[in-house]
Amino acid sequence: MKKTLRILLAGFLSVLLLAGPAADATELKKETLEAFNRFATARDAEFDAEVQHDSFLWVDAQPAAKRDEYYRVLKNQGVVMEKLDAQVAGKKYAVPSALVHRWVGIVFIPGVRVGEVVRMLEDYDRHSKYFAPEVARSKLISRDGDHFLTYLRFHKKHILTVTVDTWHEAWYRTISATRAASRSHVTRAQEVENEGQPDEKLLPEGDDRGFLWRLNTYWKYEEKDGGTYVQCESITLTRTIPVALKWLVEPFVTSVPKESLQGVLGHTRSSALAAVAASPAADKKP
């Protein structure tokens, strides 16, 4: 009995230590970032090419039975999600000293036009409203046509509490009257220490707990079936897990990218519906 209590106490103390603001810091190595950027560059080029062709949405490329089931789920206001490998055109990309989490997800927003969804997502100053509480602060830094520079503060509480300030570069494009696409890169990410306290500060980039080093997103929007389908693919770069804490911390590190994407898609749908309902042209249907 005493041995069991000692083990439980040791586990509890490990959580407290890991959750501490500066505890268990890890380094984003140069070779890690270079390898991730090679993968991201290849995915950027592949994405820019694939948005010009059918099948446009990821679900459209699935086998018929699976595709039909996915569309049934989507039209019943569900979220379709799947984990993907870190590969492009069949080539796998290894990223040393880090973990790469790649997910794709899709939602359907009934009664909303594709342009209305895109305009909402381009309104970065209001992302802290649209995507709260995960996005605690948001700001449009600059815009040049369809090119955006933005700032977002991400806040996530899931056993551990993590707050990260991020700077993004995003590109939007119109494909046709019913299709649009965009992609975004985190160009800098710094964990916030002692958030909300007088001694709040940003930790040096790449020298923190490593829960978010980079995040690339790839979006497709297609208007059909009386609404708009919104697809987002996220590629997240995080730290690896120390062997001693793998059993405890790995579920957190590996579940957050999926949960965050699911939350983003859900917030996109609810915010788009609310924005359209509040618009003077709310009776206008696709």
Image: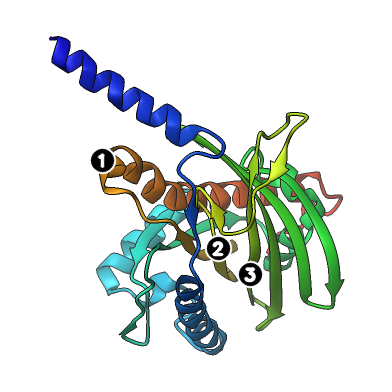
Q: Position of residue 285 (x, y in %)?
A: 71, 59
Whether residue 226 is visible, yes or no, is no
- Secondary structure state at the residue bearing disc 2: strand
Q: Which residue is mark 1?
A: 247
Which residue is drawn at the image coordinates 76% and 62% (left, top)? 150
In the rendered view, tell whether residue 55 sits above or below residue 254.
below
Among numbered discs 1 and 2, the one appearing first in the sequence: 2
Which residue is drawn at the image coordinates 64% and 54% (left, top)? 204
- Nearest to the eye among marks 3 and 2: give it: 2
- Which of the two residues, 163 or 71, is positioned nearer the viewer here? 163
- Which of the two residues, 200 or 118, is positioned nearer the viewer here? 200
Residue type at the position of mark 1: Trp
Q: Which residue is mark 3?
A: 184
Q: CA distance from mark 3 to mark 2?
A: 8 Å
Tell me if 257 is positioned left or right of 219 in this view: left
- Secondary structure state at the residue bearing disc 1: helix
